[in-house]
Image (cartoon, rainbow, N blue to C red):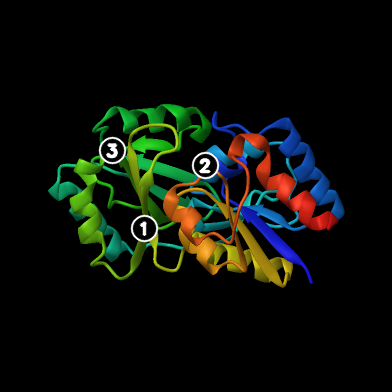
Amino acid sequence: MKTLYISDMDGTLLQSNGKMSEFTKEKLNEFYNKGIPFSVATARSMISAMPILEGVHFAAPIVLMNGVFVYDTETKKAVKYHEIEHSVLQKILDLFYEKNLHPFMFLYSDDYKLSIKYTEFDNDGMKEFYDERVDLLDGRFTQTDDLTIIEKSQHPVYVNYYALPEFLDDVVEKLKDIPEIDFAYYKDSYSDDWLIEIYSHTASKANGAKEVKEIVGTDYITAFGDNLNDIIMLKDADVAVAVQNAVPQVKEIADIIIGNNNDNSVVNYIIHKENA
């Protein structure tokens, strides 16, 4: 019986500095060479995830942007993606605009490229998000007066915003009334800001993990996580594994608690299980 191992990145597979240790990279490539299905499920997009994963090979597609994409790292194309309907996108944006907030909108194009549009920066967190990605996007991070003007070849897939909770709590409550979407709302691993990440109701880390399982043909899923946006995937997995530094809500639903993210705990767990 074969197991798909699938791990969150930030706070779980990655160290607290947001990087992957050389030991973990080496072991992940050993898993690939042995045909052990390993994947990641992250809120990151291909833009910010792939530089971290450079040099690592996967025997399975990976899950990006909380399940919006199931992505083949070899071909650099989405195996599957989940679009937000245009009428639903307008409802989402209206909720932000009511609070004078201006989110980022992610688009996936027919030529397999991801781009991000924005109108303005409301705070330092939003500006930092831009600064960290603008060069990686190579001209596909653009400012516009109207986020709803979208080319036919582009497909809205994701909306996000960074801020302290007092700016977002009201928006979060109203988002619950839009059945066509789902969202993750949790504290950033590297700052005091909270993130709201909005996507189609057909997308989630849990659904992404199931889609990867079907593609690689495994019998079970063992999932690893640390933060609130990992809970749905962990609840749905056959074995839920939390790192020691996980938030209390994740530890409560975990079957197993391993060491912290700075100790290569995910790969060490897999090595132990595969050699048992």
Which residue corresponds to mark 1?
Answer: 183
| Labelled disc at residue 245 | 2
| Depth order, front residue of 119/3 | 3
Q: Is 5 positioned to the left or the right of 225 in the image?
A: right
Which residue corresponds to mark 3?
Answer: 163
Q: Secondary structure under badge 3?
A: strand
Mark 1 or mark 2, whichever is nearer to me: 2
Q: Is 266 positioned to the left or the right of 255 in the image?
A: right
- Image coordinates for residue 19, horizontal then vertical, percent: 60, 31
In this rendering, the answer to whether 248 lies above or below 86 is above
The amino acid on which the numbered mark 1 sits, given as a three-letter code, is Phe
Q: Tell me the crowding category of disc 1: few under 14, some 14 to 19, or many 20 or more residues within 10 angstroms, Cα based.
A: many
In this rendering, the answer to whether 182 lies above or below 165 is below
Instruction: Check the picture and name the quadrant holding the N terminus.
Output: bottom right
Q: Residue at x 22, y 58 (%)?
A: 173
Q: Residue at x 20, y 42 (%)?
A: 167
Q: Is 206 positioned to the left or the right of 269 in the image?
A: left
- Image coordinates for residue 150, horizontal then vertical, percent: 34, 52
Q: Earlier in the sequence, mark 3 or mark 2?
A: 3
Q: Earlier in the sequence, mark 3 or mark 1?
A: 3
Q: Is residue 35 visible?
A: no
Q: Secondary structure under badge 2?
A: loop
